[in-house]
Image (cartoon, rainbow, N blue to C red):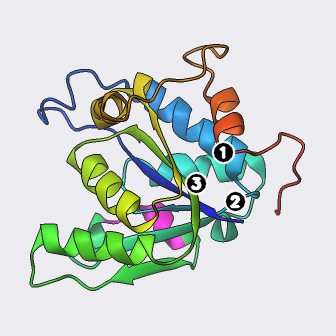
């Protein structure tokens, strides 16, 4: 059973063009939907963006799922501990990747490469986001070419641009805002599948 990679962030004000059409409430709803569908059924792997980690932590508590076993979080040591969300302290399975020459771009590349080589992935879900979404898609697709890529366009930001690039459209029989229905279908998870708690 493969893992699911999550590439997501809430675009920062002033980070054009990603902040022009981003929908923070849609981003939060889509992240919550992914947690609802996948937590306790498949491991969610992500790079610990500080705008997303608290959302996943709250969802794990709501679902009664043990956060430490539901996720696999990667962080780059390029950033200091003060930069990491407080929620990082709630679970033990954080993989810290050494920074590379004090260079942000090289350090993120090293972290992402380690993340994408850490396990087999069934899929990647892209929600909102900025430049990192494009970088993560390119490297993820190169290292996990058989995995399905699901950019949720309605969340805006880089995910919308990626959906256009991939010609990805949601199934026509689902509402554009039915994130739960979309993710159950696209990730091939059944609502009756038991959760590991």
Residue 53 % position (x, y): 47, 54
| Number of the front mark, 2 or 3 | 2
Q: Position of residue 191 (x, y in %)?
A: 83, 39
Quadrant (top left/top right/bottom left/bottom right) for the N terminus: bottom right
Q: Are marks 2 and 3 in contact (CB under 8 Å)?
A: no
Of pointers 1 and 3, the one earlier in the residue sequence = 3
* Residue holding disc 2: 42
* Tag nearer the camera, 1 or 3: 1
**Where is mark 3, residue-wise?**
57
The residue indicated by pointer 1 is 187
Which mark sits nearer the N-terminus, 2 or 3?
A: 2
At x 54%, y 34%, the residue is: 30
| Residue depicted at 32% across the width and 36% down the height | 162
What's drawn in magenta, residue-wise? 84-89
- Pick the residue in front: 97 or 84: 97
Q: Residues within 10 Å of mark 1 (few under 14, many from 20)?
A: many
Q: Residues within 10 Å of mark 2 (few under 14, many from 20)?
A: many
Q: Is residue 180 visible?
A: yes
Q: With 37 as the anchor, is 175 left or right in this view?
A: left
Answer with left or right where residue 106 lies relative to residue 66: left
Q: Is residue 56 left or right of residue 129?
A: right
Q: CA distance from mark 2 to mark 3?
A: 16 Å
> Residue 173 at what x, y percent from top left?
67, 14
Mark 1 and 2 residues: CB-CB less than 8 Å, in contact? yes
Between discs 1 and 2, the one toward the N terminus = 2
């Amino acid at each position: 059973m493969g893992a699911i990679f999550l590439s997501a962030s809430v675009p920062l004000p002033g980070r054009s063009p990603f902040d022009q059409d981003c929908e923070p409430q849609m981003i939060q709803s889509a992240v919550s939907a992914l947690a609802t569908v996948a937590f306790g059924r498949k491991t969610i792997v992500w790079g610990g963006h500080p705008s997303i980690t608290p959302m996943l932590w709250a969802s794990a508590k709501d679902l009664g799922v043990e956060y430490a076993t539901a996720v696999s979080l990667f962080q780059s040591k390029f950033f200091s501990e003060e930069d990491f969300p407080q929620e990082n302290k709630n679970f033990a399975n954080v993989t810290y990747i050494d920074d590379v020459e004090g260079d942000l771009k090289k350090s993120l590349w090293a972290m992402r490469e380690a993340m994408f080589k850490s396990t087999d992935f069934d899929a990647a879900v892209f929600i909102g986001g900025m430049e990192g979404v494009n970088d993560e898609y390119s490297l993820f697709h190169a290292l996990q070419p058989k995995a399905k890529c699901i950019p949720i366009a309605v969340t805006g930001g880089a995910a919308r641009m990626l959906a256009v690039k991939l010609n990805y459209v949601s199934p026509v029989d689902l509402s554009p805002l039915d994130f739960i229905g979309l993710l159950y279908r696209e990730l091939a998870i059944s609502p009756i599948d038991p959760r590991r708690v």
